[in-house]
Amino acid sequence: MCELALYLPFFMTVLLSVVAFLLLLTVLILIHEWGHFTAARLSGVTVEEFGLGLPPRARKLWKSKGTVFSLNWIPFGGFVRLKGENAITNKERTSKGSFGSVAIWKRVVILSAGVFMNLLLAIVILTIGFSVGKWIPTYTTLEAMELSAQKGIIDLELGVFVSDVISGDSAAKVGVPKESILSAVDGVPVTVPNDVVSAQEGKRVVTYTIKSGEGFETEKDFTIRLKDGKAGIVLTPFPIKLDAPKHDIFMALGLAFRETWVVSILTVKGIGTLMKSLVQSGKVPEGIAGIVGIAQLTHASVQEGFMMYLRLVALLSLSLAVLNILPFPALDGGRLVFVIAELIGRKPVNRKFELATNTVGFLFLIFLLLFITYYDVVRLFTGES
C-alpha cells in the first residue's frame, strides 16, 4: 500500500497528461469543424452531421435544423458532413442546400472558415499569454532579439557561450569545460564573442573567467596561452537572462500577430524540410512530431504548468491552420484549388477525378502520419534522432 502511494503522484500526472492531450486535440479539431459548420449554415448549405469524436457512431445526440449531432466511439476530434460535398452527379451536386449549389465565394468562405477559427483561437491565446502570461516571443535571429530588447518587449542580458573546446588546443589542455559561460577576459567582462576577440588582441596569455555547472553557478579562472591570438574554443552569443514584462492589450495583440506570422513561416519551412528529408533519406528529421510526439510535448507542458500548456495549444492551432490551407489534396487548401479551378474554367472539375484525387491525398496523409508516429515511438524508446 505504501509503495502504491509513492507512485500515485506519477500516475496522476500521466492521467492528467492523457486528459490534456485528448482535450487539446479535441478542442483544436472541433473549433476547426465549428468554423466549417457555422460558415455552411450562414451560406445556406445543409450540414447533415456534426460529429463529436470520430466514427463509428456511438449514438445520435439530437437533431437541429437538419443537422444530426452525434457522439462517436473514437474519443477525440470531430467532423462535419455537408450535403452534396461528395456528390457525383450534377443533379446531386446542385440540389437545394448542397455544397455545390451555392456561389463560389461562399464555398471559399466555407472551406477557409476552419483555418480562420484555428488562427483566431491562436491569436486570442497568444494575446492573453503576451499580456498576463509574460510570454517571450519566438525569435529566429539574435539581431531580432536584441532589437526587441531595445524596444522593451523583452528583458535580455547576453553572455558568451563556450559551445565547444577543440581537443589538443590551449583551452582543452588547461581544462576549460565546454557548454560553459565565458564571463570575463583578464577581469574585463565580455557579453558577445567580438568582446573576446578585442580583449585578446596583441596578447600571448590571457585569463578566462568561466562559469559552469548547473545554472552556471561554479566560477573558475583559467590561464591560457594563445596561438595566433586564439585559445581553441568555439564561442556563440547566449542569453544569460531572458524574460518579458506584462504588456498592455494592444502591444500583446501586436505580438500575437507577429508570433502567428513567425510560427507560420517556421511551420511551412518544417514541412519543406520533412519532404526534402523523406525524398533524400527516407527519414523523418528531428523536430517533426506525430501523435506520440505531441503527446510527449503535452506531458512536458502539463508538468511546466497551465500557461505552458496553453502556449502549446496556441502553437498547435497555428500549425493545424497552416497545414490545412496548403494546396494538397484532401486538405482544405486542396479543396480550394478545385473551387478556384471551377471559377477559372467556368465549369466544375470532373467530380470523379476530384474525389479520386482527394482520396489518394487522404491515404497519403494517413501513411505520412503513421510513418512520423513510427519515428516518434523509435525516438521514445531508443533516443535516436
Image (cartoon, rainbow, N blue to C red):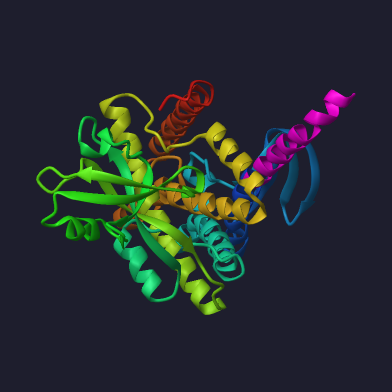
Where residue 344 appears, as percent x and y from the top left, is 30, 56
Q: Which residues are magenta?
A: 1-24
Residue situated in front as seen by the camera: 247 or 47: 247
Image quarter where the N terminus lies is top right
For residue 175: magenta?
Answer: no
Residue situated in front as seen by the camera: 245 or 19: 245
At x 52%, y 24%, the residue is 377
Where residue 60 appears, as percent x and y from the top left, is 79, 41
Could you tell whether 253 is left or right of 41 in the image? Answer: left
At x 37%, y 74%, the residue is 150
At x 66%, y 51%, the residue is 305
Is residue 79 visible to us here? no
Q: Is residue 166 above or below residue 238?
A: above
Where residue 179 appears, as percent x and y from the top left, is 37, 42
Could you tell whether 33 is left or right of 226 in the image? Answer: right
The image quarter in which residue 291 lies:
top right
Where residue 59 appears, as percent x and y from the top left, is 80, 37
Residue situated in front as seen by the camera: 39 or 75: 75
For residue 9: magenta?
Answer: yes
At x 49%, y 23%, the residue is 374
Q: Considering the whole magenta stretch, tell me its main secondary structure.
A: helix
